[in-house]
Image (spheres, helix red, strand yellow):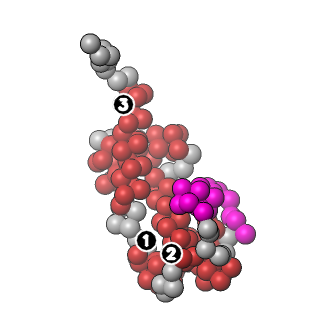
Amino acid sequence: MGIPSRAATPREADNLRLLRVRDAIDRGYAEPLDVAALAAVAHVSPSHLIRAFKAAFGETPHRYLQRRRIERAMALLRETATPVTEVAFAVGFQSLGTFSRTFSEIVGSSPTTYRRTAAPLLAPGCFTRAWTRPATGTARG
């Protein structure tokens, strides 16, 4: 017979929209993404998206996007010899200066210093991502 379906509550519907936005950021972090485009994914206004996303995930969509980009940059810097400038553009930053400033702010060291001091991690990818995920609001050093 199956489980009878029920309509999602407004809270559940809002949570599903926010998960779609987070998934869009995770998939498209290297693409130009702005709050208006992300709000369109959720079918809400940009200001509502910012408030709801921060309430659900503890940071704004823009900050989440920055952290995802930096997280990917950290992996590229650790595991490849790709020049820092190319890493910056590959993860979606439009300028090396913005990339370097954001990287230093989130990680606690410059991309060049990070590359020099970070050794490749010999662990499954899921563990590596969890251990190296940049924390929100704190610098690591």
| Residue 112 visible, this angle | yes
At label 2, the amino acid type is Leu
Instruction: Determine the residue positioned at 51% across, 39% down.
Output: 56
Instruction: Determine the residue positioned at 42% across, 35% down.
Output: 15
Q: Are marks 2 and 1 in contact (CB under 8 Å)?
A: yes
Circle 1 — which element?
A: loop
Does 25 sit above or below residue 141? above
Query: Cα distance, mark 1 to mark 3?
Result: 31 Å
Q: Say which quarter of the image contains residue 16.
A: top left
At label 3, the amino acid type is Ala
Bin the neighbour count of mark 2 within 10 Å (Cα to Cα): few under 14, some 14-19, many 20 and up.
some
Residue tagged 3: 13
Bin the neighbour count of mark 1 within 10 Å (Cα to Cα): few under 14, some 14-19, many 20 and up.
many
Query: Cα distance, mark 3 to mark 2?
Result: 36 Å
| Residue 110 visible, this angle | no
Q: Say which quarter of the image contains residue 17.
A: top left
Which is more N-terminal, label 3 or label 1? 3
Q: Say which quarter of the image contains residue 138.
A: bottom right
Does 45 sit above or below residue 118? above
State which region is magenta: 123-141
Residue 43: image location, x then y, percent: 29, 41
At label 1, the amino acid type is Val
